[in-house]
Amino acid sequence: MRPLHRPGQPLLPTPKAGEKVAKGQRSQVGQALAQLEDRLPKELKLAGITTVEAANRFLEEVYLPEHNARFAVAPEDPETAFVADAAGLHRDILCVQEERVVGNDHCVRYRDLSLQIPPSPARRHFVKLRVRVHDYPDGMLAVFHGPRCLARYRADGGRLDHAQPLAA
């Protein structure tokens, strides 16, 4: 397998978030993935593999064990690195997020709903500010301004009391 980067060669910069993608320029991750995608078909051809079943056997019995023997690194700490998400932060990552602008009536329009933003000690008003609507898989909604949750709503747009716990 070719090295991902040769010393002395300039690294191509990764395009910045929000900027147009340079069609002729790959990010470092893109370059690595292209090289890996190119390598496996060549390995299969060299091994004379022509069926999906044989390819799956080859991957399990030959390719992955050789790859892991070459690149695997023993963990510094043998204990699991998994950290439970007791606070339920995954909900705000694994949801649909759409930007909206708050109207003069302190409402955010989302789908056919009008989500009223309640008074807040953080600001006098949110009129004309950009906010994010989080649409959760269970149908619940929330409106955020930056990291701050302004309000949570049922699927029908009715506001939830802040004291009500959310299902994780």
Image (cartoon, grey):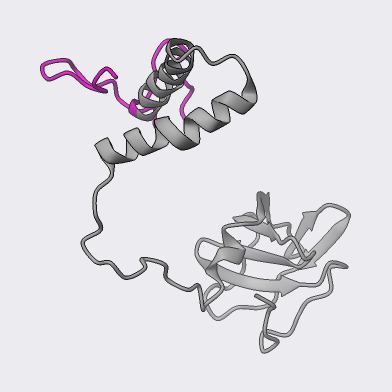
Q: Which residues are magenta?
A: 1-28
Residue drawn at (56%, 73%), measured in percent from left and top? 88
The dominant secondary structure in magenta is: loop
Decide: is 32 above or below 105. above
Q: Position of residue 87 (x, y in %)?
A: 52, 77
Q: Left or right: where does residue 30 sit relative to residue 130?
A: left
Q: Nearer the viewer, residue 86 or 146?
A: 86
Quadrant assignment for the N terminus:
top left
Q: Residue furthest left?
A: 8
Q: Nearer the viewer, residue 87 or 130?
A: 87
Q: Position of residue 77 (x, y in %)?
A: 24, 66
Residue 47's image quarter? top left
Quadrant assignment for the C terminus:
bottom right
- Magenta stretch: includes residue 94: no
Q: Nearer the viewer, residue 70 or 13?
A: 70
Q: Nearer the viewer, residue 58 or 95?
A: 58
Q: Is residue 18 in view? A: no
Residue drawn at (88%, 68%), measured in percent from left and top? 156
Q: Left or right: where does residue 123 sit relative to residue 151?
A: left
Q: Is residue 40 in view? A: yes
Residue 152's image quarter? bottom right
Q: Residue furthest bottom?
A: 163
Counting every numbered tag in the picture gives: 0
Residue drawn at (74%, 60%), measured in percent from left and top? 137
Q: Left or right: where does residue 105 sit relative to residue 8?
A: right
Decide: is 17 above or below 115. above
Decide: is 67 above or below 121. above
Q: Position of residue 41 (x, y in %)?
A: 48, 16
